[in-house]
Amino acid sequence: MKSLIPAAFCVSAGLLVAAPAWAHFILVSPDSWIEANALGDPQKALPCGTSEITAGVPTGKVTALRGGDPVHIKIRETIYHPGFYRVSLAVLDRKELPKDPDAVTRESARGPLSVSGRIESNPQPPVLADGLFLHHEKPAAGSFWETDVKLPNINCDKCTLQIIQFMEAHPLNKEGEFTYHHCADLKITANPALPINEDWPGQK
């Protein structure tokens, strides 16, 4: 059985590399809630990539999982940029999702440029894992970032798993600043052999 990866550790994997100017990624697993093009767009606006400015077409896909089990995260970064990823879960409403990581910036000819983003060493709900796939070099082409992240033992008919990419050395985006966003819709059924995680909304 594949071991679970602690929140603040990064997992060795690869990604498809292109020009280093603007980072993009595709959520390969679990299934995305929205249709994406070859670069992974739409993905700029929080919380899940779309906005009134950037519309998207829902896929209607909902991934069924058991509480307390791992969810497999698989990402293909279509355009390389240094940085890291974070995984969060909203149970009742996407408004539960956290704000994007606080950024340290510096001024450049293109305006504010990101230097680093805040990583929580001890993530708390709604964050499941932080600082994943931290990288500062261009990995091998054609491979993926992937890991398992443990789900809380909860019940939800349609909750939202959010995967975001914080980009270092990146200019300000109009909608997402220094972060790109993807989401997946999940149906989680609690494992009756485990206690319910009451730290999560709607579980008491």
Image (cartoon, rainbow, N blue to C red):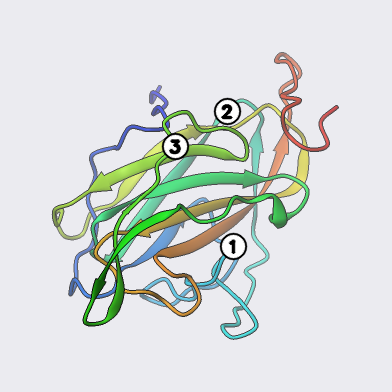
Q: Could you give the CA–CA distance between mark 2 and mark 1, rounded to whole angstroms?
A: 24 Å
Residue 101: mark: none
Determine the residue positioned at 44% across, 45% down: 73
Judging by the rendered image, the residue that carries numbered circle 2 is 69
Mark 3 vs 2: CB contact within 8 A:
no
Q: Which quadrant does the N terminus fall into?
A: top left
Determine the residue positioned at 36% across, 42% down: 132
Helix, strand or loop at disc 2?
A: loop
Determine the residue positioned at 28% across, 45% down: 134
Q: Nearer the viewer, residue 177 or 5?
A: 177
Q: Residue 33, image x and y in percent?
A: 60, 63
Judging by the rendered image, the residue that carries numbered circle 3 is 120
Vertical order, 171 against 83 (above or below): below
Q: Residue 82, image x and y in percent?
A: 23, 57
Q: Earlier in the sequence, mark 3 or mark 2?
A: 2
Q: Earlier in the sequence, mark 2 or mark 1?
A: 1
Q: Quadrant of the rendered structure where residue 190 is?
A: top right
Q: Quadrant of the rendered structure where residue 51 is?
A: bottom right
Q: Could you give the CA–CA distance between mark 3 and mark 2, rounded to whole angstroms?
A: 22 Å
Determine the residue positioned at 42% across, 71% down: 40
Q: Which quadrant does the C terminus fall into?
A: top right
Q: Earlier in the sequence, mark 1 or mark 3?
A: 1
Q: Residue 201, image x and y in percent?
A: 78, 37
Judging by the rendered image, the residue that carries numbered circle 1 is 47
Vertical order, 175 against 163 (above or below): below
